[in-house]
Amino acid sequence: MQVLKFNHANVHQQLSPEQLVTATLNNNQGILNDTGALCINTGKFSGRSPDDKFIVDDELTSLNINWGGFNTKISKHHYQLLKAEVLNYLDNRIDIWYRKCYACAQPEYQLSLNVFNEYPSGNLFAYNMFLRPGDVEQDKVLSDWTIVQAPGFYADPVKHGTRSPNFSIISFADQTILIGGSGYTGEIKKSVFTVLNYILPANHHVLSMHCSANTGHNGDVALFFGLSGTGKTTLSTDPERKLIGDDEHGWNDEAVFNFEGGCYAKTIGLNEVSEPDIFAAIRAGALVENIVFKPGSNIIDFANNTLTENTRVSYPLNYIKNIAVPSIGNIPNTIFFLTCDASGVLPPVSKLNIAQAKYYFLSGYTSKIAGTEAGVTEPKPTFSACFGAPFLPLHPSVYADFLGKKLEQHKIQVWLVNTGWSGLPYREGKRISIKHTRAIISAALNGSLITQEFENFPIFNLAIPTTCPGVPQEILNPFNNEPGSKTFEHRVYDLAKRFDANFKQYENIVCQSILEGKPTFS
């Protein structure tokens, strides 16, 4: 694919982070904090808008995409009309910013990305989040994609076939991503993730995953599945283990590999004690979004959610001290499903058998964290298939089948870890502390958790440990944290019924053995 040509706009190519920061400051589009990080406001949108994401309905996608839900059709005509108008809009700017970067650390699957941004801060995000030219073997690129981000361009829904003025559109035939009407940079990374979630499973028999990953001193690898805000970045960034990546990975027959070259961490409530590596990464070159400063200073108030709960920072992987180079690891030994349970029902940790692992993966239960998506203002219980439904172009059962076969082949232990509330629900109880969740993760990884005595958690039939090193015994069973046991039993039953109702859509599609992992009501 040829790189787009512009006749009028001044196209700045491959600028350094320092140059992009300077351009942003000169345009009055950002300000530096006390550690030198660039802080911006992304405008109306401080989170993704999944209802405004489209895939072009064409000869490549018509029969292959799992249409409906998060996969909404847009016609080739509307796409081509929008593309022409977006490019014309950018060509009439004084300046635009371009860079070549890449996705996928595993050479044979690498995509070349030609990224065009209306604002220099968007181009800094691309520099931070994707692999840079020096990080990849450029002669092994699988295909070329173009990303065009124009926050100042607004669609006319009647004319352009969109739902609203903002949009994110993927054309697999044209190998192009168009983003308009939103300055939220997360739309860029999740669009690329959606592309890889189609290409890798469909064409290369590679499982694509919404998870973080790290590796220990002996080469053991852990995966952390979960939606945004459940702890993927926090828990995988561990000074005792090398970080492979914090959000998106592929798994072929031989290895796990990162899709990205950077991290995109939530910063709400960030503090140096509980998350020292992320805290230290907020320095020159990092891009911080939608934060508020402490009065009369340029010191970030990480507790302030005035603009959004979804405050974010992007930074290159090498801003973390302990990383795997390249971002590739062995076949996983341990898998964690991270769920933020706002209902307060699920235990802090449960040991899953293979049937349960398949069931909970396909269910993808969690709570959407406030601010991550437009309109979400407090934790909202949801089921997101494979812990990433908004980014799955294929039917969720495709990804679940992939994972199930790998679990059976490699005998991998899977743990369900609740990073939300346990015993008492949101607004009544306290969220499980990071300190205790880290202790659970450490015990699972060093082998001490599996040796503990386990008891059954009723209805869900989950095996929960009676003790865990570093964790108060009384919090391991949520029945101990709810003074009214009958009230808690009703909430357990209600959540189990939610699981059952959600899974009805899969019962005639999946292998019947998965149903052995579902809750029982007798």
Image (tube, grey):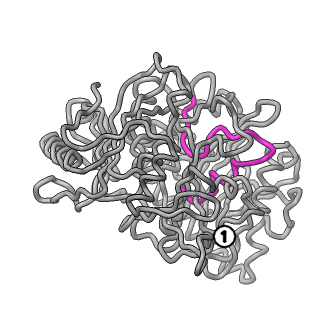
Q: Decide which of 522, 438 is in the foreground and name it.
A: 438
Give the magenta-colored segment's residue range. 228-251
Q: Decide which of 267, 233 is in the foreground and name it.
A: 267
Quadrant in which residue 408 is drawn = top right
**Is any part of residue 232 visible from this angle?**
yes
Q: Compared with residue 60, is residue 385 higher up or lower down, i.e. above or below?
A: below
Q: Compared with residue 474, is residue 65 higher up or lower down, i.e. above or below?
A: above
Total count of labels: 1
69 to the left or right of 161 = right
**Which quarter shows the N terminus?**
top left
Question: Outermost residue, top direction?
Answer: 139
| Magenta stretch holds residue 250 | yes
- Residue 317's spot in the image, x, y percent? 62, 42
Quadrant in which residue 203 is drawn = top left
| Magenta stretch holds residue 98 | no
- Residue 509's spot in the image, x, y percent? 42, 41
- Residue 381's spot in the image, x, y percent? 51, 66
In the image, what residue type sits under mark 1? Trp
Q: Compared with residue 451, is residue 138 higher up or lower down, i.e. above or below?
A: above
Pointer 1 residue: 421
Could you tell me which residue is drawn at 47 percent across and 17 percent down?
140
419 to the left or right of 512 = right
Could you tell me which residue is drawn at 65 percent across and 81 percent down?
487
Could you tell me which residue is drawn at 45 percent across and 33 percent down?
101
Kind of element beneath mark 1:
loop
Could you tell me which residue is drawn at 58 percent across and 60 percent down?
266
- Residue 224's spot in the image, x, y percent? 64, 46
